[in-house]
Amino acid sequence: MEMGDDPLGLFLLPKAVKDASLRPPAHGREVGKESPRWVLLDKTAYFAGADVRNATTATSKTREGHEIQVTLCTAAQPPLVSYMCVHSPTLKPSHDFAKEPTILATHDDLLLFRLTLGHGNRHNLFLSDYFVYQAASDGSPPSLTHITHPCGDPDNLFPDTHVGILHHHHPLIPLALRPHNPQHYIVAALTPTRKPGGEYRLHLYHSTTKQWTTKLLQLGGLPPSPPLTFFHHYTDKVINLSHQAPGLMGFADLWRGLLLVNVLHDHEPAPTYIPLPPPLRPRHDNQLPNGDTSDVRDIAIDLQGCINYVEFELSILPHPQRHSGSYIADGWTAAKWSWIAESGCWRMDCHLHSSDISDTMMPRLPNYSEPQPDLEKLHVGHPVLSLHDTHLVYLMAKIEDRAHKAWILPIDLRNGVIQQPADFAGADRTSGICEMYVQTNISRYPQTAPTGN
């Protein structure tokens, strides 16, 4: 753990900003070349000097008037992880920021992130600034917009995983004029209320009005969530289904199911619920799920518009030193499903156990001089689905789960093949194996400066 300045040793507080966050990777900055159709994007931003600029750079200001410059470095093909850089001419990362800016959601050319200033405000959402970055398109340069805070009511604040963003074509703007106007968007977050009976709040920010509104959703009529006797939903990830119907979003509880809500309806929406497939390892009837779902599951919309879901089950053995906080990896199982809308069911597309892959087929881990570990003894997790090859999943891998060196393993679940791994440059900003990056297609938008008329 990195500790802040504490000359007397009286307090052991973690640094607000990790030293590694001041050293962005060198890859991904090359613009002007053919851009990847999609990328893995680190959710935690890096800080960089004013010299880290390219055609994606856009600026805005915080609520206190500090200039913020954002640059996307998304030219790296997976399994390399792309990233976002933040710079301010008036703020020092190690002194003025509560933590690194965090990406909350992406959709097409839109990216929503949160930034918090001031030591001690790390978990204070009241003092956060929210920004929407929009990539260049239709001849318009990239833009960065500081959006209205969700307001001072604690019930209107939302955890990072509860929020998504989508485009909204304003009906009052003629279709012929839309290419010459910035596209409007909606930020949507779903949170449970403190009342029993399945009551939820749907928080909506409209770029047209620059205001937040809140709707109450009554979901108590949906089937109970086993092993509970009532419906319960905790959003782990938000996916965008507006290609199926304008305004349709999926709020995924990766332990339970997918809640489909149309956020454009003025009347009370009638949500649709899709339970997830049964888990690979059945739980006892009275056993509640626990742990971070992103460590073992993912759901995504691929480039063809299909819903894909993957579950990853790790087998572990207790560590000889019981209080070490670590464990011994002992193989894994992965399965991938796709949602078949016509039949209203999940189809298992592939199922793979680590023992099905020969160690002789394991590519060498780059920049690792020690003897290569057996695949089944690697600490792996955080599966992320490819948006292009629907049978490909990317796993984070470490020799030890607490190590500050990691790789991204692309695994073809259909053919049982591990493709060439890549170093994960953000590994020294991790603790264990946890969610660090997401898939996005923002890279396919122009990364060259627009030409004048």
Image (cartoon, helix red, strand yellow):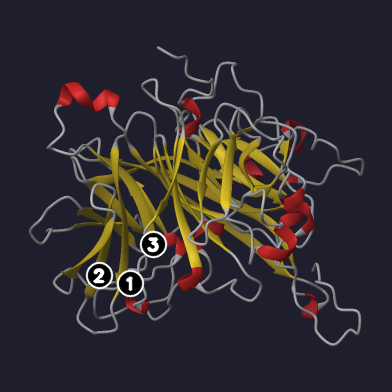
Whether label 1 touches label 2, CB < 8 Å: yes
Q: Which residue is mark 2?
A: 201
- The 10 Å Cα crowd at callout 1, few under 14, some 14 to 19, many 20 or more, is some
In the rendered structure, which disc, 3 or 1, sits on the residue that comes first in sequence? 1
The residue that mark 1 highlights is: 156
Q: Is residue 400 left or right of residue 183?
A: right
Q: Quadrant of residue 222?
A: bottom left
In the visual, does 239 lie left or right of 353?
left
**Of callouts 3 and 2, the N-terminal one:** 3
Residue projecting furthest to the left: 267
Relative vertical location of residue 181 with respect to residue 66 in this rendering, above or below: above
Local SS, label 3: helix
Residue, disc 3: 162
Please give the name of the residue rendered at 84% of the width and 73% of the height, measured from the top-left corner: 5
Residue 99: image x %, image y %?
64, 63
CA separation in Å, label 3 and label 2? 11 Å
Q: Amino acid at mark 2?
A: Arg
Which three-letter amino acid code belongs to the residue tagged 1?
A: Asn
Tell which tag, 3 or 1, sits nearer the viewer: 1
Indicate the quadrant containing the N terminus: top left, top right, bottom left or bottom right.
Answer: bottom right
Residue count near mark 2 (Cα–Cα under 10 Å), binned few <14, some 14–19, many ≥20 = some
Residue 409 found in image quarter: top right
Residue 206 placement, left or right of 16: left
